[in-house]
Structure formats: C-alpha cells, structure tokens
Amino acid sequence: MRAELLYRIQIQQILPGIVTHFQCVGQYRQNPARKVYKKMLLSLMIFVPLLGMIAVLLLPRESEELIKRVTLAFTLIPLVLAVVLFISYDRSAAGTQYVQGPVPWIEAFNIQYHIGIDGLSVTLLLLTALLGPICVIASWRNIEKGIKAYMALFLLLETGMLGFFAALDLFLFYVFFELTLLPMYFLIGVWGGPRREYAAIKFFLYTLFGSVLMLVAMIAVYLNSGTPDARTFDIPTLVALASTEGHALANLDFQIWVFLGFFIGFAVKVPIFPFHTWLPDAHVEAPTAISVILAGVLLKMGTYGLVRINMAMFPQGLDFFCNGLGTWGNSLALLGFINIVYGSFCALAQTDFKKLVAYSSIGHMGFVILGLSARNSAGITGAILQMFNHGVISAMLFLLVGVIYDRAHHREINGFGGLGSRMPIYTGITTLAFMASLGLPGLSGFVGEALSLLGAYDKFKMLTVLSTIGIVVGAAYFLWTLQRVFLGTLNPKYESLPEINGREILTLVPLGILTIVLGVWPSFAIDMFSESVSNLLDTLQVSL
C-alpha cells in the first residue's frame, strides 16, 4: 500500500510537467517563427556555400590551412541541414515540402524564386551535402597550388548542385544547372592531370551543346504556357498544364520536340550513348575530389532532370519515344541497354584504374535509364534508388583510386600486385566497394539494379535479359582488377607502400556504412520517395 501511495504521488507530480511539455511543443509547432524557419531552411542550405566562397575570397592567400578549415565548415553546415530535412521530411505526404516562394525575381517575365523538395530531391540533396565535406577532406593534402581559388570554386559548385535539386521554377532550374558548368571547367582545367585542358574543354563544349538545346526548349515551353500576361516558368504549373487536354503544352507534336531538346541536354550529363565520350577524359584528368563530385552528383543531375522535366512535364513526348517508333520499340530502354553493355565491355578493356571506374559508371547509369523506361513502380523506384546508390559507391571507388595514385603515382592496374599483404585495410575497403558495385546481395548496388530489372522485365523481357550481360561483365572486370592489384606476390617496388591513413578512412567510412545499410535496409531510402513515384505514375497514366 505504501509503495502504491508513493507511486501515485510521483505520478501526480510528474504528469503536469509532461502535459506542460507537450503543450509547449504544440505551441512551438504552431509558432509562425518556426514556419518561417522551415521555409528559410532550404534557402540557407543552398546559399551557405556561396557565403563560404565569399569568406574564402576575403582570406589571405597565404593562410592555406585556415582556408581549408573555413571551407570544411561551410560544407558541414549544409550537411547538418540536409540531415535535418531528411529526418523531418513527412514521408506520408504527397507533393512538395519546405516550399519557399514563389517570390518575384524578374517580374516582367514572371520569373520567380521558387524552391521546395519532394522525396526524390531530398534524397539527392542529402547525397550532395554528404559528398561536400568528404571532397574537402579528400583535397586537404592533394591540392598543392591555388588552394584559395580551388576552395572558392568548389563552394560555388556546391551551391549550384544544391539549388538545382531544389528549384521549382524552370528558369531558376536552368540557372543552377548552368552554374555548375563554369567551376567544374576550371576545377578540371587548372588542377587536373597532364591533358587537363583538353578534358575541360571537351566537358565544357559537350555540356554547353546540351544546355543550348535545353534553353531553346525552355523558351518554347514558356511561350506556349499561356497568354502573354499568364506565361510562367513555374514547374508545378507547367506539369499541370502539360496534362490539360486542349492546352498548347499538351499538344503531341510540341511535346515531341521539346522532349527531345531537354532529353539531349540531360543525356549529355548522364551520360547516355553516344553523348558519353567526354566522361572518361574528364574523370581521368580531374583531381580525385572532383571525380567524386562528377560521378556522385553531376551524373545524377542528368537523370534527375529526366524524371523532373521529361517524364513529369512531357508524358506524351515520353510515350512517343518509348512506344512510337514501330519495330524499334522502346527507344529509351534500348539506350539503357546500350549503356549497360557498352560501358561494361569498355571497362573490361581498361588498364587504367580510374578509366575502368569511369566506364563502369556509364554501364551502371544504364540501369537507371532502363528502370525509368519501364514506367512502372518497380522500375522507377529501382532507378531512383540506383541513382543514390551509384552516387555513394562511385564516390568510394574514385576516392580509393586516389589513395593508391597518391602513393604509387600511377594507375596502371597491371603495374601493381600483392598489395593485399601490404595494405590490408585498403584492400578490405576496396573489396567492399567492388562487391557493392558489381551488385552483391546484401549491399546497396544489388537492390537498385534488381528493382530496375524487375520493372523492365515486365515491359520488355528480351532486352532486360540481355542487359544482365552487364552484370556478368561487371563481376568479371572488378574481380579481375582485384586479382591483379591485391592478390599474388607483392611487387618489390611497393614493399614500403604506406597503409591508408586516418584522413582517407574518414572520407570512406560514411560511404561504406551507407552501402551496407542500404543493402540490408533499402526502405530507409525507398520510403522517402515512394509518394513521389506514385505522383509521377499518376502523371504518366494520362498518356498511357
């Protein structure tokens, strides 16, 4: 009885405090200041790196260590904010969240500052924000000249990438898309390898060619969006108009041409065959950290654009290119198949470690295209998951290539041998990345590819079966590389080769953890964009 009495007294004392706490929480959630904070959170994440660039430019050129620390701080802030967005994002709600705007920007043409996120964009924002500080740490000892300019350009590049994934105005979308071009050109052309100028110019011209076609298509969309007083660049509005029967944007002939303009622009970025030839050169010549960003984020800008613009805004144009070519069948699936097989066999033929990883990226992005071409839940879910997974795995691979290049000063696969006995930790992490990339069950690379193939098999069985050739060839070139570099007798030249250090492990551990977590628990990411996939399927259903 005494114990029960004491228990009741404690409850009576504690319960009012609990009630008061929840009342405070409720008041905070309804607080207008919190709503303003939520709206500003996304803008803060996008433009903090830009503020960091200004801060870096104001620092003395000689203070290299301070410049690096300031840059790292200004890339860690977007990562923290991206984690907050990821955790607080309402997975059960459809549509965009954390919307800011539309705020008039260029009023004469109804251009607005309008940003927001859905499940697809919040996932890619997290990937971009994660790779930011990792790349700064990876550049800490590898960049020896022009530290101030390098870090400033990198921060500008991060602003462009983050803004691209959040833009809800087509003009703003294009501005952020183009904003990544110039810093990437200089980051490759100034800090790259022996053929850096050639690789940078090739990258610039290819991307600019696609951008010009996108610009023409964007202007056409704007001019046909309504009367002169009602024309708009607002992406959600354009998506709705393009599905409205009788509207100019819903005209089949119009959608075919603008679809093609946007498609080529994004195809260069993915890259899709035959717009791919800039990628191996850019990767081989780029510094390690820039190769990480190139494979981890910039390639995803292409596939994200295909989903956000081509598929959502021009469903009839998509339908034509998928099914309107007679005996050619699904042309998008055919391009995905070509990417898979071509990229895989090219990777198999490489003796340069970095070029092998570059061509493997072409092959793996083919699975994304194949999944999107299926236009069903499994295919699109697998494609989006593969976008994130490939960003993580390819970042690991390029970081690992950079580790061995910093020590041996070459990337010739046949020039190594037996490194497993000398560098066991490096060998273990590399093996994890190889197994994930070739699609070993239990690691993240398997789930995305499996869902893409599952969705594609429902629509085009023979092409899907033939696409599995890429998986077999992928296993071949990764296992062969593992054998030539790490197994056998240690090359006497590398008896004193140092093991991977703590700074390099710090860049790889977060990516390795994500690779394992997403292999075992893929719903961690899938739940984020499931509602976005449903919305996209509803849009596509209009034309099917």
Image (tube, rainbow, N blue to C red):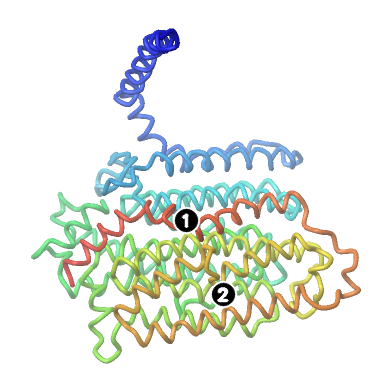
Identify which residue, 157 or 212, lies in the foreground: 157
Q: Which residue is mark 2?
A: 360
Identify which residue, 515 or 17, lies in the foreground: 17
Helix, strand or loop for disc 2: helix
Q: Position of residue 534 (x, y in %)?
A: 26, 58
- Crowding around mark 2 (Cα neighbors within 10 Å: few <14, some 14 to 19, many 20+) is many
Q: Position of residue 444 (x, y in %)?
A: 51, 63
Identify which residue, 444 or 139, lies in the foreground: 444
Measuring 71% from the left and 53% from the top, which residue is drawn there?
A: 505
Measuring 18% from the left and 56% from the top, which residue is drawn there?
A: 240
Q: Check the image and name the residue furthest to the front.
A: 1
- Crowding around mark 1 (Cα neighbors within 10 Å: few <14, some 14 to 19, many 20+) is some
Residue 62 sits above or below residue 253 on the image: above
Q: Position of residue 417 (x, y in %)?
A: 81, 76
Helix, strand or loop for disc 1: loop
- Specify whether 136 is left or right of 331: right
Residue 466 sits above or below residue 213 on the image: below
Measuring 15% from the left and 56% from the top, which residue is drawn there?
A: 226
Q: Quadrant of the C terminus?
A: bottom left
Q: Which residue is mark 1?
A: 521
Residue 34 sits above or below residue 130 on the image: above
Marks 1/2: CA distance?
A: 25 Å
Q: Position of residue 37 (x, y in %)?
A: 38, 30
Q: Amino acid at mark 1?
A: Trp
The answer to whether mark 1 and mark 2 are in CB contact below 8 A is: no
- Sequence-first disc among 1 and 2: 2
